[in-house]
Each structure stands twice: as structure tokens, then as C-alpha cells.
Amino acid sequence: MEDLKILVVDDESRMRKLVKDFLVKDGYLVLEAEDGQQALDLFYDDKDIALIILDVMMPKRDGWEVCREIRSNSKVPIIMLTAKAEERDELLGFELGVDEYISKPFSPKILAARVSAILRRTNQALNNQVMEVGGIVVNKVAHSVAVDGKEVELSYKEFELLSFFFENKGVALSREKILNNVWNYDYFGDARTIDTHVKKLRGKLGPKGDMIKTIWGMGYKFEEIDK
């Protein structure tokens, strides 16, 4: 985790120093902001920020406003700090996409442990953002697909379907399971929407489309073609 940048945003200098000292001890680089506007300026100026620790009650722009704007542009992990321990504040934080919510006063050791855990999860997730099988490259960050180095244009659902196949390579998938995971709802009725999307996806992948194998009466399985 060394050399990862963390932005600490709090209008209390004593609190910023306390948090910074513990994070620096763990090998992180720490940037500081004393209000919401300064936090946003630093965030836009530095593209290498790995995590943000954000206080709620601040001058100029409060933590909720800062969080909302950052979330509209980035998935960078955010830990919210607040002196309030009310449930509605916590729920609001999670609705805005906060990764952790810690009420003051808190143990700096616990905060540092939460930071470490979130960054481990984030790094593991990033490792799955670019996947390659048999000459097909799926980049989930850029939302792009290339076949033998040539980019292929897919619809949103085709891209999600291919990503799901990649993540379940070699696994027999029922139409119901595909629908529940790619379309995100329980499907009762005609499953031809899956067959239609698979047909289009195979066509766009060319010969590589043969990696999507039909399991008659059940669904599909994605596996690399034997050479």
C-alpha cells in the first residue's frame, strides 16, 4: 500500500494532523484540505488520489455536497467522518456511494485499518477490470472490447453479457442466472431475449463467438476454443 495518496478533508487542523500521522506511519502519502472547495480543487488537480477521508460539517461546501460531486465523476473510495451518529445521516452517506461511515470520536488505529481494508478490496477489483481470453480483451474501466487487437462496438447489454461470461469462464450458466445477473431482475416468461443478445454478440465477435457454447435446454457456457 506504500506511496498511495489519501486526501484527508477536515476543517479542524488537529484532526487532520491526527489522521495524517497514523496514515503516514503506514506508508501512505497524505494530502490535506480544510474545506469542501479546497478538497474538490485538490481532487481535480491530482488524478492519483486512491482514497478520500471526508468530514461532513465543513465551511464553503459540506461533505455531502463534495461526495455527491466526486461520485458523479469518480468511483474513488470515500470514508465519511461525522460527529453525528444518526441513522439518517448514515443512510444518506451510503445512498451517495460512501464506502465507509465513521462517527467521531473514533480510534485512529481503527480508521487506518478501515483504510487498508478498503484499498485492498479496491486493488483486487482493479485487477479484474481488464480481462483477456483467447484474443478477446474486455476493459471494464474503458467499457471497451477488442478482438485480436481490433476494437468491437457492443451495446451496453452486450458488453455486460460478455463481461458476465468472462467472469464465469467454464461455468454452465442457465438463462435464468444470466437474466438475474445481467438484467438484474427475476425473469418469468420467455427467455428469448438472452438468445437474441447471444446471437448478436457472437456475430460481433466473429470466429471468436464460438467461445460462447450453447447448452441445449439450459443456457450457455463460455470457454476458450481449443487450438
Image (cartoon, rainbow, N blue to C red):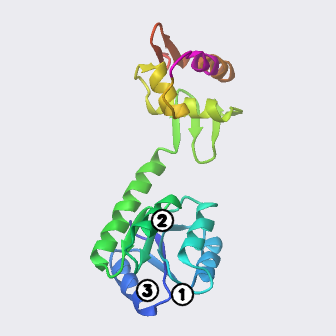
- N-terminal label among 3 and 1: 3
| Residue 195 in view here | yes
In the picture, the disc for residue 115 is none
* Kind of residue indicated by mark 1: Glu
* Kind of residue indicated by mark 2: Gly
Q: Seen from this angle, which residue lies furthest top? A: 216
Give neighbour class at mark 3: few <14, some 14-19, many 20+ (Cα, 10 Å).
many
In the image, residue 190 lies in the stretch drawn in magenta: yes
Q: Position of residue 183 (x, y in %)?
A: 55, 32
For label 2, the residue is: 93
Residue extent of the magenta highlight: 188-197
Tell me: residue 8, above or below residue 209.
below
Helix, strand or loop under label 3: helix
In the picture, the disc for residue 16 is 3
* Kind of residue indicated by mark 3: Arg
**Magenta: main secondary structure:** helix
In the picture, the disc for residue 34 is 1
Q: Are marks 3 and 1 in contact (CB under 8 Å)?
A: yes
